[in-house]
Amino acid sequence: MKKPVIIAIIIAVILIAILGVVVFTNNNKEESKKIGEQQITADEFKSSLEDKGYVVMDSTSQMEQYENIKQVYIATDKDYSYRIEFYELTDNEYATSFYNTNRYNFKSSKADTDQETETDGSIENYSKYTLLSESKYKVVARINNTLIYLDVDATNKDTIDGILKDLGY
């Protein structure tokens, strides 16, 4: 009589353990959007920032002379004190070139002071460069053929980092 009870307990423990692993794995997938995992569309950028109270303008017409730029949105905070630029380009190759040019420009603007911090990283379809000084915070980030560009006052760093995290950049 003890043997069937022990077997039933062992089976119940195994089933609970398997269920726990499945639930834990699914929760972790849903809770976190990994940085650089999936690009957003221009419309998703627009609606996401409008939901956060930003004024978002379609600036594509200002870039008509550049055939490799498909869509441009510029989001400004409610005080118009800084802006976040979003570019959708025709392909990954041009986006990478656009990213590298802006990364180089940021690096070239870097002064030789101890008060500056920079991060630089690339993996597969994702690249991000940041430069933080006492007065400025500069970011250029790319996922596939989309790019986000910022050159703002350093006082806005935490706000910007939160937005970039929400967007997956």
Image (cartoon, rainbow, N blue to C red):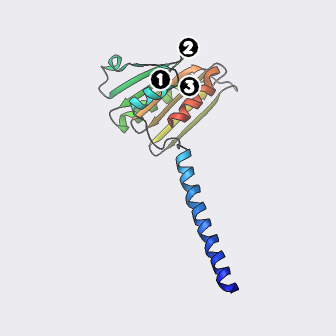
How far is disc 1 from disc 2 in space, using C-alphas? Answer: 16 Å
C-alpha gap between disc 3 and disc 1:
22 Å
| Crowd around label 2: few <14 · some 14–19 · many ≥20 (10 Å) | few
Question: Which of the labelled discs sits on residue 138, or is there none?
Answer: 3
The mark found on residue 70 in the picture is: none
Label located before the other in sequence (3 or 1): 1
Amino acid type, label 3 = Lys
Rendered image: mark on residue 81: 2
Q: Position of residue 96 (x, y in %)?
A: 41, 36
Label 1, secondary structure: give it.
helix
| Spot occupied by residue 33 in the image (x, y as percentages of width and height) | 52, 43
Name above or below for residue 11 compared with residue 87. below
* Tag 3 secondary structure: strand
| Circle 1 Cα neighbour tier, 10 Å, few/some/many (<14 / 14–19 / ≥20) | some
The amino acid pointed to by label 2 is: Ser
Tell me: 97 left or right of 163: left
Q: Which residue is mark 1?
A: 50
Q: Whole-percent x and y of residue 65?
A: 30, 19
Viewer-side residue, 24 vs 128: 24
Q: Nearer the viewer, residue 96 or 84?
A: 84
- The residue mark sitting in front, 3 or 1, is 1
